[in-house]
Amino acid sequence: MNQVQSVRGTASLQFEPALVRVEGVTLQYKTPDHLVTATYRVSLDIFKTDRLVLLGPSGCGKSTLLKAIAGFLKPVEGSITLKGKPIDAPGPDRMMVFQEFDQLLPWKTVRANVAFPMSVNGVAHDEVRARANEAIAKVNLTKFADAYPHMLSGGMKQRVAIARAMAMRPDVLLMDEPYAALDALTRRKMQDELLQLWQDVRFTLVFVTHSIEEAVVIGSRIVVLSPHPGQVRAELNSGFAQSDRDAPRFQQLTTRISHMLFDAEAVSPEKGPKP
Ligand SMILES: Nc1ncnc2c1ncn2[C@@H]1O[C@H](COP(=O)(O)OP(=O)(O)O)[C@@H](O)[C@H]1O
Ligand SMILES: [Mg+2]
């Protein structure tokens, strides 16, 4: 079977309705002297069982699209729905993990950082503590539950951010290049840990990266976006249950995506507006 399928084509293989539907979404920024089109008529479905990766070069609108799913930005055209309802504001059902190591509250311990969103969202006190401890254990940081962020490495801070998001039990976990600032070895370890966590807990993941290899490791589905303004160029099913970097298919998929991104002749994206 051809691995490249249309977004709706793959959707039709699923048995349940999409959890998140992005339909014809154009996102723009207004600056004092011009309008920046970040994404142009992007459509994709996100299913409950997905580890969906948004892959594309810097500036193609990946973060912008993720922010729109999170509810921080509204489309100028098209719609985004979660369980059939329009997304019009941020909510605890969509938790975000960012690239930056400074996303934790520096004056709070690891446990207090993980507890914080639950406390402000009205989770009962006892449950907050139990869920915080459980989430911290899931990311292997129990020994550091009482440590402060400045005592942690970059990778550990990202694990805390993941625990904090997961403890909220969101419908969707949104991750924006969470490992981009880590060294290669730590990055690889973090990718494997995330997949292990996904095997244990089974959550819906939307993961943004500009790394082809990372996309193939993490994604069960990969949506390839064209350069600025971002449009859906292709969607691929990775089909890897676990990251198997040594499998020949892994290399084949990586090479194939490289061609898509770098070989302009290989694709004919829909014509969008001038950025
Ligand atoms: N706050 C902003 N104001 C104006 N333009 C922005 C803003 N944020 C991003 N952009 C522009 O929108 C486009 C997409 O940006 P972004 O979503 O950050 O891309 P990516 O995450 O794929 O690198 C880029 O051209 C970027 O310069
Ligand atoms: Mg970005």
Image: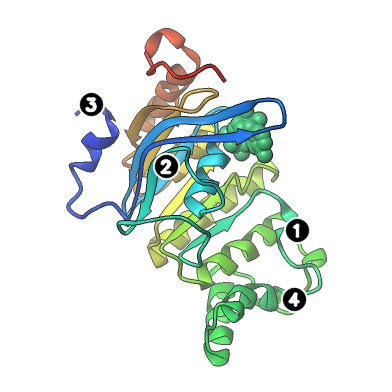
Residue 212's x, y, as percent? 51, 31
Earlier-in-chain disc, 2 versus 1:
1
Whether tag 3 and tag 4 are in contact, CB under 8 A, the answer is no
Residue type at mark 2 is: Asp
Secondary element under disc 1, as helix, strand or loop, is loop
Earlier-in-chain disc, 3 versus 4:
3
Residue 145, above or below 219 = below
Q: Of residues 74 and 184, which is closer to you in this image? A: 74
Q: Label 2, on which residue?
A: 244
Secondary element under disc 4, as helix, strand or loop, is loop
Whether tag 2 and tag 4 are in contact, CB under 8 A, the answer is no
Residue, far bottom: 126
At label 3, counting other C-alpha atoms closer than 10 Å, the crowd grade (few under 14, some 14-19, many 20 or more) is few
Residue 215's x, y, as percent? 48, 38
Q: Closer to the observer: label 3 or label 2?
A: 3
> In screen coordinates, is 31 left or right of 21?
right
Residue 192's x, y, as percent? 51, 52
Q: Label 4, on which residue?
A: 109
